[in-house]
Image (tube, helix red, strand yellow):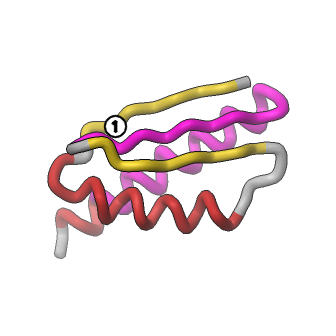
Amino acid sequence: MKAQVSLKTGKDTEAIAKALKEEAKAGLPKVDVKVWPAGEKLKIELEAEDLTSLRAALNSFLGWAYCAQEVMANE
């Protein structure tokens, strides 16, 4: 199972990508994650052994991306 997400994150894309890369490095069971900035968009690619793991990882990374963006907006 594979998913790729592109989020419009604006000028804070580099900082958000850096924060999420740390989460990706920590490793998730059954899931490989790649995170990279692409201009003002954040790209997240997830590959999981099963749909349940993919859904859980996607939920986590979307939540972390939202949280990181809110932190940057309130600095």
Quadrant housing the C terminus: bottom left
How many numbered marks are there? 1
Instruction: Say above or below: 56 vs 28.
Output: above
Is residue 59 magenta-colored? yes
Q: Is residue 19 left or right of residue 29?
A: left
Residue, x 74% and y 55% (percent of image)? 28
Region in magenta: 40-69
Is residue 28 magenta-colored? no
Residue that numbered label 1 is attached to = 7
Residue, x 77% and y 38% (percent of image)? 53
Q: Nearer the viewer, residue 55 or 17?
A: 17
Instruction: Say above or below: 10 vs 2.
Output: below
Residue, x 49% and y 49% (percent of image)? 35
Residue, x 27% and y 54% (percent of image)? 13
Instruction: Say above or below: 75 vs 10.
Output: below
Please state the horizontal and vertical placement of residue 56, each as a whole percent of the image.
Answer: 68, 41
Please state the horizontal and vertical placement of residue 24, each as a whole percent of the image.
Answer: 61, 58
Residue 59, quarter of the rendered image:
top right
Magenta segment main secondary structure: helix
Residue 38, quarter of the rendered image:
top left
Quadrant housing the N terminus: top right
Q: Is residue 74 left or right of residue 29?
A: left
Q: Nearer the viewer, residue 24 or 38?
A: 38
Please state the horizontal and vertical placement of residue 32, each as a whole percent of the image.
Answer: 71, 45
Q: Amino acid at mark 1?
A: Leu
Mark 1 Cα-neighbour bin, 10 Å: few <14, some 14–19, many ≥20: some
Please state the horizontal and vertical placement of residue 25, each as a whole percent of the image.
Answer: 64, 64
Secondary structure under tag 1 reads: strand
Q: Is residue 4 left or right of residue 53?
A: left
Residue 50, quarter of the rendered image:
top right
